[in-house]
Amino acid sequence: MPSDYVIHSATELYSVYYGSMRSGVASMTDGLDALFEGRGPTLSAGEVAELLGMTKQGVYHWLRDGVLPGYKVGTTWFILRDELKETLRKGANAGPARSGPGKGDE
C-alpha cells in the first residue's frame, strides 16, 4: 500500500488490517494512524461517526455511556483524536465494568 494512502472508513480499515495481517505487511497501529491521518487534534461527533462508519446518534450514545472518550462542554461533545486512537488500540471501552449473574464467572 502506498505510504500516502488515506483510509476513509472503519470498513476500509478492517480490509486493510486483515489484508495486511495475511501478508504480514502492516500492523493495527499503521491502520489507525492512516485512518486518523490529516485530522486535527479535536474531533466532533460527526467526524467520529464518519470515521467509524456509524451514526452520530450512535456516537453520542457511546460518549454518554463512556465507551468512547470525550468531553462535554454545554451541549457540545469534543473527542480528542489521540485518546480515541488509544481507546481503539486497546480494544476496550472506558465504560463501567458490568457485573451480575453470568457476567465474568466461568
Image: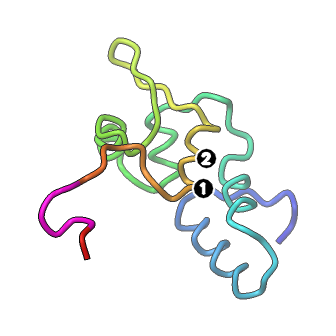
10 or 65, nearer to the observer? 65
23 falls in the magenta region: no
Q: Which residue is identified by label 2? A: 85
Which quadrant of the figure has residue 84?
top right
Q: Residue furthest bottom?
A: 22
Find the residue positioned furthest to the front.
105
> What residue is rendered at 74% in x and 69% in y?
27
Residue 57 position by quadrant: top left
Residue 26: where, in percent of width, then height? 78, 72
- Magenta span contains residue 102: yes
Q: Position of residue 61 (x, y in %)?
A: 28, 41
At mark 2, the secondary structure is: helix
Relative to 95, residue 102 above or below: below
Would you say 50 lies left or right of 99 here?
Answer: right
Distance between mark 2 and mark 1 Cα atoms: 6 Å
Give above or below for 105 relative to 66: below
Q: Provide the residue designation for mark 1.
A: 89
Residue 94 figure quarter:
top left
Mark 1 secondary-structure assignment: helix
Q: Amino acid at mark 1?
A: Arg
The image's colouring method is rainbow
Magenta stretch in the rendered image: 99-104
